[in-house]
Amino acid sequence: MSLIVHHLNNSRSQRILWLIEEIGADFSIVHYSRDPATNLAPPELLAVHPLGKSPILDDGGRLIAESGAIVEHLCERHGGAHLVPARGSDAYISHLEWMHFAEGSVMTPILLRIYTARLGEAAAPLEPRINQQLDSHFSFMEEHVSDDGHFVGDALSAADIMLSFPAEIAVMQGMGARYPKLAAFVEKCHARPAWRRAREKGGAYYGF
């Protein structure tokens, strides 16, 4: 049975489309669009998941939320094993660290920046701390991405796919010159045929 991705434009679900294109699995997309005024997801997503968020993967009727869980499921069950280092290896430990970093660490200051941007001058007391945390996390990524554009090993991994979103945010927010290796990483991700196919199918995506 085909996989179904409940996909919100300009969101982290874009990398799920990319992953599925990389592994060559059959899938379809249910599209949702953000409210142009609030930038929030539409209420229709609440009918899919109580949190009303995307991505949501429907695998034969089993709904799976959380990007990291979806990526691990796809790699284990749908042909993406080559994107995960061998269990028990040091590379696998690094893979786990980066998979969790992508959602558990770097997204916190990113989301704080997004939310406080709507507060105007009221956000001023938080700005120094948010900026420090963004620089800390993006600098950490900049230090660890290889010159050939990988965070684990010397080939594309699931961790690279997970980390593509925060790296894209850094570039989108005008920080590419400050983090040139991250900017190059984003360019290499976007040059992959599977990413291009996913972008065509996914629709509007931050101007990329």
Image (cartoon, rainbow, N blue to C red):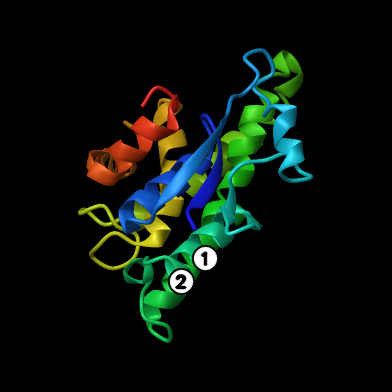
Residue type at mark 2: give it.
Answer: Glu
Crowd rating for badge 1 (residues with CA inside 10 Å; few <14, some 14–19, many 20+): some
Q: Is residue 139 above or below residue 9?
A: below
Q: Nearer the viewer, residue 82 or 112?
A: 82
Q: Is residue 204 above or below residue 84?
A: above
Which label belongs to residue 76?
2
**Residue at 20% from the left image edge and 54% from the top image edge:** 148
Q: Is the C terminus in the top left, top right, bottom left or bottom right quadrant?
A: top left
- Quarter of the image for residue 138 reads top left
Crowd rating for badge 2 (residues with CA inside 10 Å; few <14, some 14–19, many 20+): some
Residue 205 left/right relative to 114: left
**Residue at 69% from the left image edge and 18% from the top image edge:** 38
**Residue at 58% from the left image edge and 38% from the top image edge:** 110
**Residue at 73% from the left image edge and 18% from the top image edge:** 119
Residue at the spot of label 1: 73
Question: Do labels 1 and 2 touch, CB within 8 Å?
Answer: yes
Q: Secondary structure at mark 2?
A: helix
Residue type at mark 1: give it.
Answer: His
Residue 177 left/right relative to 20: left
Residue 144 visible in the displayed image = yes
Task: Give the x, y percent position of residue 46.
Answer: 76, 38
Q: CA distance from mark 1 to mark 2?
A: 5 Å
Q: Is residue 191 above or below residue 2?
A: above
